[in-house]
């Protein structure tokens, strides 16, 4: 495994991972979000992507599943190029993926069971509803929520919604699960339940896991490999110990939650009252 891929210009071969990016660049207008990234995601491992808000973490994983297409570069899944596929072909590829969205993205009008059935109904013609009900029961049992089939999202806690969304993400027995900020908005105990579920599913299902997170406690607990994005590039790549001891100051500031000296200087600057600003006395009669 590469440790310090700061230039990120080493060629990546098709056989290096289940998901492979080659010289991927993504622009929105003139804004370069991902800048010539080459990356291989190892099969059966948990890769965590960290970095400051707006650095392109979610944009990166959306390319894995074809929800976004690169401005330039290539995306491969199981040695097959997918970024240039038509939408109907991409839909077939997506059945190999599960995606846990940041807010869960449950359908409020559907019951818990209906939410988990949704991807099954989208991709398969159901002839045996009893079998589908057993699948729903099994998936809910994996996240500790069997018995909640007839509940609706409005009656669930934030942590329960995330777990139902995770049950839906594994409904099609995916080979890859993508998690977008899975612990956001949860208290530390509920967040650790999600961490334990991520570890459990990786262990029991043997799937490839990619997690986007700001939560370093979670990252250190679940990751086989941690990648940090900054200014559209990978500036750190390695296991938890490597990241903890990384010499790059930007990495240390992020993982330790430290404000930069430049930002501190702005925050600590004394405020001044400009001549154009109104004061309370200006309104006295």
Image: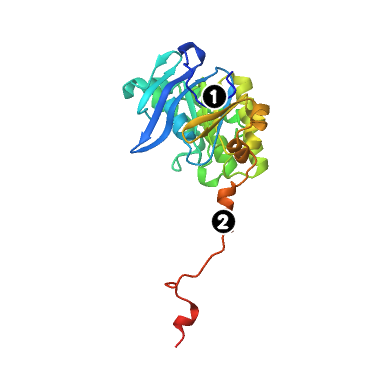
Judged left or right of residue 57, residue 183 is right
- Does 264 sit above or below residue 234? below
Toward the viewer: 85 or 134?
85
Label 2 close to label 1 by CB (< 8 Å): no
How far across and how far down the image is residue 149, in percent? 54, 35
**Badge 2: how crowded within 10 Å, few (<14), some, or many (20+)?**
few
How far across and how far down the image is residue 19, in percent? 48, 19
**Badge 1: how crowded within 10 Å, few (<14), some, or many (20+)?**
many
Instruction: Name the residue beneath numbered marker 2.
Output: 267
- The residue located at (56%, 50%) in the rendering is 263
How far across and how far down the image is residue 274, in percent? 46, 70
Q: Secondary structure at mark 1?
A: loop
Q: Secondary structure at mark 2?
A: helix
Q: Quadrant of the C terminus?
A: bottom left
Residue 125 seen by the camera: no
Direction top: furthest residue = 15
- Does 255 sit above or below residue 65? below
Q: Earlier in the sequence, mark 2 or mark 1?
A: 1
- The residue located at (65%, 27%) in the rendering is 242
The label on residue 248 is: none
Q: How is the image coloured?
A: rainbow
Judged left or right of residue 217, residue 181 is left
How far across and how far down the image is residue 119, in percent? 44, 28
Toward the viewer: 143 or 126?
143
Toward the viewer: 125 or 57?
57
Instruction: Name the residue beneath numbered marker 1.
Output: 5
Direction bottom: furthest residue = 285
Q: Quadrant of the N terminus?
A: top right
């Amino acid at each position: 495994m590469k440790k310090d891929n700061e230039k990120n210009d080493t060629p990546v071969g098709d056989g290096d991972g289940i998901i492979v990016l080659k010289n991927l660049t993504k622009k929105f207008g003139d804004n370069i979000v991902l800048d010539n990234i080459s990356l291989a995601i190892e099969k059966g491992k948990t890769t965590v992507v960290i970095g400051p808000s707006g650095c392109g973490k979610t944009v990166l994983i959306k390319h894995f599943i074809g929800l976004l297409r690169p401005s330039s570069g290539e995306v491969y899944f199981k040695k097959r190029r997918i970024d240039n596929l038509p939408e109907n072909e991409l839909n077939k590829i997506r059945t190999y993926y599960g995606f846990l969205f940041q807010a869960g993205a449950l359908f409020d009008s559907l019951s818990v069971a209906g939410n988990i059935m949704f991807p099954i109904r989208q991709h398969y013609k159901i002839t045996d509803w009893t079998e589908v009900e057993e699948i729903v029961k099994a998936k809910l049992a994996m996240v500790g929520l069997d018995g909640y089939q007839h509940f609706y999202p409005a009656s669930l806690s934030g942590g329960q919604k995330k777990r139902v969304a995770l049950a839906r993400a594994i409904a099609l027995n995916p080979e890859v699960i993508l998690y977008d900020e899975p612990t956001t908005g949860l208290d530390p105990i509920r967040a650790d339940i999600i961490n334990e579920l991520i570890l459990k599913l990786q262990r029991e299902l043997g799937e490839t896991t990619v997690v986007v997170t700001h939560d370093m406690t979670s990252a250190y607990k679940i990751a086989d490999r941690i990648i940090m994005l900054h200014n559209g590039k990978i500036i750190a790549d390695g296991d938890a110990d490597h990241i903890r001891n990384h010499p790059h100051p930007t990495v240390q500031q992020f993982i330790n939650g430290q404000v930069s000296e430049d930002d501190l200087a702005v925050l600590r600057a004394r405020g001044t009252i400009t001549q154009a600003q109104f004061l309370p006395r200006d309104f006295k009669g």
